[in-house]
Amino acid sequence: MKVIITGATGMVGEGVLLECLENPAVERVLSVSRRPSGHTHPKLTECLVPDFRELTAVEPQLTGYDACFYCAGVSSVGMKEPEYAAIIHDTAVHFAQTLARLNPGMVLVHVSGAHTDSTEQGRVMWARVKGKAENALARLPFKAVYNFRPALMKPATGQKNIKRSYRVALIFYPLFTLFFSGIPLRSVGLAMINCVRFGAPKAVLEAEDIKRQALQSG
């Protein structure tokens, strides 16, 4: 399969990228990002885009792909709802609309988050916005759309894009997994690949669903 990945300069996207580069089911990877990923590989091509809402000039590079693993995003800490929604909802939907037009047989896998609010009516701002993004993406004319809601994730060996605070928290990863459903990022990437290869039983995958999807073999 030929795959587009966004967010490869962040922790989640980088982990997914590394799995795709090593997985024999993936023939080619296009990283779409605002800056280089810092990785080189015979499978990997990079497309640098300053604004995901301005894609006209790079549309020819986005054509001919089987899947998009949308891992781009930001933390809501310190952000007001309009600016957070502009990134999490507006940018994601515009990017996905372009891909759906260029690749109508594409599968979209979108990284959301645990406790996302599908009703779009709850009190927690980030959960509402992510829920609105999930719902909008699910309505687009792709072959299939899967929203991933991972919780605690463990970076893969060789990852570079990990915030210092997260590196410190990883010391306690074994303890955290007693209370939260932890999952290695490489398994998240494998689950995405399996969604494209075999499909999935549901459109919204929580942490335990993602673990099971990573074990899917047909």
Image: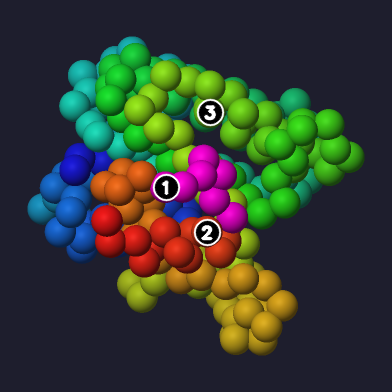
**Does the segment drawn in magenta span residue 73?**
no
Of residues 141 and 98, the one nearer the viewer is 141
Residue lying furthest left: 42
Of residues 30 and 144, the one nearer the viewer is 144
Q: Write the start and end of the magenta stretch as one range.
A: 200-206
Of residues 186 and 169, the one nearer the viewer is 186
Q: Which mark is residue 138?
A: 3
**CA–CA distance between discs 1 and 2?**
9 Å
Residue 155 visible? The answer is: no
**Proximity of marks 1 and 3: CB atoms separated by less than 8 Å:** no
How far across and how far down the image is residue 67, in percent? 30, 37
Q: Tag 3's secondary structure?
A: helix
Give the number of callouts: 3
- Say which amino acid is labelled 3: Ala
- Say which amino acid is labelled 1: Ala
Quadrant in the picture for the C terminus: bottom left
The image shows residue 19, relative to residue 86, as above or below, that is below
**CA–CA distance between discs 2 and 3?**
18 Å
Q: Which mark is residue 33?
A: none
How far across and how far down the image is residue 36, in percent? 33, 46
The image shows residue 215, relative to residue 52, as above or below, that is below
Which marked residue is nearer to the observer: mark 1 or mark 3?
1
